[in-house]
Amino acid sequence: MKLPELKIGKLKAAFPIIQGGMAVKISMAELAAAVANEGGIGVIAGTALKPSELREEIIKARKLSDGIIGVNIMYAARGFKKLLNISVESGIDLIISGAGFSRDMFTIGKKTDTPVIPIVSSLKLARISEKLGAAAVVVEGGNAGGHLGSDKDVKDIIVEIKENINIPVIAAGDIVTPEDIKDILKIGVDGVQMGTRFLASREAAISDVFKELCVKAKSSDVIKIMSSVGLKANAIKTEFAERVKAGNPDPPVRCDKCLKHCLENFCIKDALLAAKGGDLEKGIFFTGEGIGKIDEILSVKEIFTRIKEYFSNQLELC
């Protein structure tokens, strides 16, 4: 089996792999550029960045790579439209967005000829996305990391979507190993989005404590919590995550109104920043159910080398 190119609008990625946009401040310029340099699509997580910070990250990524660089901005974040405008003004190649649905991003995409890729979890939203001008959709299942739009496994929803729309369909959720990529591509999807594997990379902007958790965690250690965003999310089981799941988290000490709508039972931004820094007491450590397949931290180059070698061997066996 040969890995196909991933074509999104006028863009062509040598490998059908999009690196998940992991926030807060995990998928930054270094990680995105490293993925783009290997022929995938690197993604900067714009959520919770100030406009000036996002511009700086895009500029930095451009200096590090001439590959395809995208941005992922969560619709639920306040300042969403401003971050979109900063992204296109800074020359980003494509826009990815989830945790809600925005018509504004399609207008901005059309004005600037920037491909827009919504993250969806249903055929209804996939069809609406295509009608509004989406260049592709990422279909995310309940086995993916972070905020979720469905409880269903991605394999249980993606076939119906692929058969009923005419734009590229990219699968997300429990895609960690080369074998996972092969299995999901056999279904007929156009590409994959991988977050958890790149979370456990040398270039991911997280502490060694978080990386050690990624190596030690089993899939059974992943629990679903209700984020203050108002969506379910997958996270590694910790004492704080279990208190959030039980409805007994620590309330915010302060609030800077970073979300359009917030349950205000705890601050998800502070919890994600704490996780990034390795704070086991206050952090929420987002990851997908496939974390149990991770047994070592690899560089992005090593991740791609193993994928290339696996598919090269598959061709030799044919």
Image: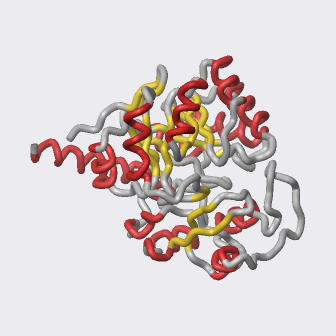
Q: Is residue 201 visible?
A: no
Front in this rendered view, residue 220 or 195: 220
Picture coordinates of residue 213, whole percent (x, y): 52, 73
Picture coordinates of residue 163, whole percent (x, y): 37, 34
Query: Residue 113, relative to residue 95: is it above or below?
Result: above
Question: In the displayed structure, does residue 114 sit left or right of residue 266?
Answer: left
Picture coordinates of residue 184, whole percent (x, y): 33, 48
Front in this rendered view, residue 171 or 300: 171
Picture coordinates of residue 16, whole percent (x, y): 38, 38
Q: Is residue 317 visible?
A: yes
Front in this rendered view, residue 188 or 82: 188
Look at 49% across and 31% down and name the residue there. Answer: 136
Question: In the displayed structure, does residue 3 sit left or right of residue 198?
Answer: left
Question: In the displayed structure, does residue 145 sit left or right of residue 168?
Answer: right
Look at 72% across and 29% down and name the residue there. Answer: 104
Query: Residue 155, relative to residue 129: is it above or below?
Result: below
